[in-house]
Image (cartoon, helix red, strand yellow):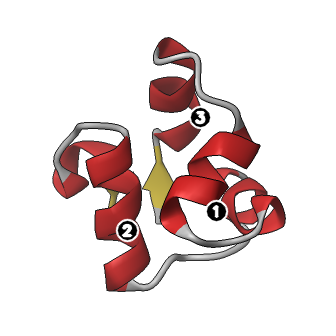
Amino acid sequence: MKNKIKEMRKKLGITQEMLAKECKVVRQTINCIENDKYDPTLELAFKISQTLNVKVDELFIYE
């Protein structure tokens, strides 16, 4: 599953560390999700989308 996390995060000036802290995960988790090495749980996907203030379906692209 592809995503636009990095793009959205950078628009808001948020670092991986800041996003991770808000979502209560480690920075490496955010890095792996951004680089398509890991698909987040549904709960984490919603936390990320809320933090970035976008809808889940705007953030993740199912192929």
Decide if residue 39 is in sight here.
yes
Q: Quadrant of residue 25?
A: bottom right
Q: Work out whether 41 lies above or below 17.
A: below
Q: Work out whether 47 lies above or below 10.
A: below
Q: Residue at x 23, y 56 (%)?
A: 56
Decide if residue 63 is in sight here.
no
- Type of amino acid at the residue the image marks with label 2: Ala
Number of residues whose C-alpha sits closer than 10 Å to that of mark 2, classed few (under 14), some (14–19) or many (20 or more):
some
Q: Residue at x 64, y 62 (%)?
A: 33
Q: Quadrant of residue 30?
A: bottom right
Residue 21 horizontal/vertical position (percent):
63, 57
Of all residues, the one furthest to the right in this rendering is 28
For the residue labelled by badge 3, is the local secondary structure a helix, a strand or a loop? helix
Q: Which of the marked residues, 3 or 2, is nearer the chain's N terminus?
A: 3
Number of residues whose C-alpha sits closer than 10 Å to that of mark 3, classed few (under 14), some (14–19) or many (20 or more):
some
For the residue labelled by badge 2, is the local secondary structure a helix, a strand or a loop? helix
- Type of amino acid at the residue the image marks with label 3: Lys
- Type of amino acid at the residue the image marks with label 1: Ile
Residue 19 horizontal/vertical position (percent):
58, 47
Cβ–Cβ under 8 Å for marks 3 and 2? no
Along the line of sight, which residue is nearer the eye, 31 or 62? 31
For the residue labelled by badge 1, is the local secondary structure a helix, a strand or a loop? helix
Query: According to the image, label 2 marks what residue?
Result: 45
Q: Which of the marked residues, 2 or 1, is nearer the chain's N terminus?
A: 1
Using the numbered discs, state the Cα–Cα distance from disc 2 to disc 1 in whole angstroms.
10 Å
Number of residues whose C-alpha sits closer than 10 Å to that of mark 1, classed few (under 14), some (14–19) or many (20 or more):
some
Q: Work out whether 22 lies above or below 17.
A: below
Query: According to the image, label 3 marks what residue?
Result: 6
The circle on residue 33 is 1
Q: Residue at x 16, y 47 (%)?
A: 55
